[in-house]
Image (cartoon, helix red, strand yellow):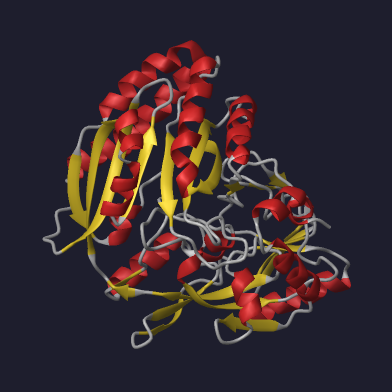
Amino acid sequence: MSTTVSGKSGTWRNWAGNVTARPVRQVTPASVEELSAAVRKAAEDGLTVKAVGTGHSFTAAAATDGVSIRPQLLTGIRRIDREAGTVTVEAGTPLKRLNAALAREGLSLTNMGDIMEQTVSGATSTGTHGTGRDSASIAAQIKGLELVTADGSVLTCSERENPDVFASARIGIGALGIITAITFAVEPIFLLTAREEPMPFEKVLAEFDELCSENEHFEFYWFPHTGSTNTKRNNRSAGPERPVGQLSGWFEDEFLSNGVFQVVNWVGRAVPATIPAIAQISSRALSARTYTDIPYKVFTSPRRVRFVEMEYAVPREALVDTLRELKAMVDRSDLRVSFPVEVRTAPADDITLSTAGGRDSAYVAVHMFRGTPYQAYFTAAERIFTAHAGRPHWGKVHTRDAEYFAEVYPRFGEFTALRDRLDPDRRFGNAYLRRVLGS
């Protein structure tokens, strides 16, 4: 049975704490039928409806003052089709539970992002991605979707069934309906060898094309106020498994990357002048290491230090210029940036509003520690990104609107026309969607 919570206790906050909402009621449906009923009831009451996952978006994509759908009872694997190489999973399943369940079945996604706290529907709807030469975002691995539309009916889509909906709904920002199940392409589990090593900023930029073409998954972090980066290459391996040792793993991933990093950011927030010196030390703290493990243990890492983030996808060929401009901007400003800048890539895909839709892309993510003023840094960075026709991540901080998106997405009109057809009364609308898609 679904539970409904209404009244004043229902203030919702996202993970970063920069978005709050007060829905009229919160519903936790235990089945697709109950979710459909909740959508129909909202329509009767003249209320908007939004599904909310774990709140990992930095935008107000999931915020509503109407009915908030919590999908935590819609979890687990519905079916595994080994012949087709697919798994169908309920929309509220957290990625970390999906990864662990697939591993137990000897299966894995081909690629994933570096955080696995999100629900599968939240992660895919906002275009969450990792880095890859040949394999793209999590949404690009979707083979089928089931969603509840504005009139409460259940629509299924794939390349064969309702292909126009499928093209858009894989990254639908919650505008087309509420996803109830996702069918992903999976493959037999494999091993990845990760090689992490420091490298000078200029060397990474000079060799960027080779590093991307020679490695299945390449990414790096640049430490502002320094000329240093930390690089990571993940490639398939015949084994044997050589996971990170428990002690060294705790030291690097928990103590340095979360514990010390948290303290360093507290110091930096209190005394911003210390940040450049701290950055020099931080950039040298992580030493080179190599390890081999199953995919999710290599792709993902814990993120306990809370931050606010902006990320843009620029055309792959514009990356080096974009980064040089970003570094020059930080160097000549009085900004003090304690978080590294993360750089990843993705091949072009065919999803209507995918940040990598129709073009090979590179992602540049800028972060600020939660509680520090981020506007000046993000505004200056965004000016650089938009000059290169950048497309912001749908779940991260940005100031763009529908007029801008119509310019950088050739198929933008295709998406808005589909939205007009599936949700003419804007049952799934909110302030964020009004800004990014128009009313």
Of the pair 270 and 82, the residue shown nearer to us = 82
Task: Give the residue at x 65% y 52%.
Answer: 408
Where does the C terminus fall, quadrant-wise? bottom right
Where does the N terminus fall, quadrant-wise? bottom right
Q: Is residue 298 above or below residue 252?
A: below
Tell me, yes or no, if residue 122 can be seen here: yes
Residue 249 is situated, as x and y percent measured from the top left of the image, at 23, 42
Q: How many marks?
A: 0
Task: Give the residue at x 88% y 67%.
Answer: 46
Q: Is residue 62 above or below residue 382?
A: below
Residue 14 is situated, as x and y percent measured from the top left of the image, at 61, 46
Tell me, yes or no, if residue 17 can be seen here: no
Of the pair 193 and 415, the residue shown nearer to us = 415
Residue 279 is situated, as x and y percent measured from the top left of the image, at 38, 21
Task: Give the residue at x 46% y 41%.
Answer: 319
Task: Give the residue at x 44% y 13%.
Answer: 274
Q: Is residue 73 above or below residue 163?
A: above
Left or right? Give the position of 12 relative to 370: right
Residue at the far left: name it.
240
Of the pair 26 and 46, the residue shown nearer to us = 46
Left or right? Give the position of 416 relative to 311: right
Of the pair 244 and 67, the residue shown nearer to us = 244
Residue 294 is situated, as x and y percent measured from the top left of the image, at 25, 61
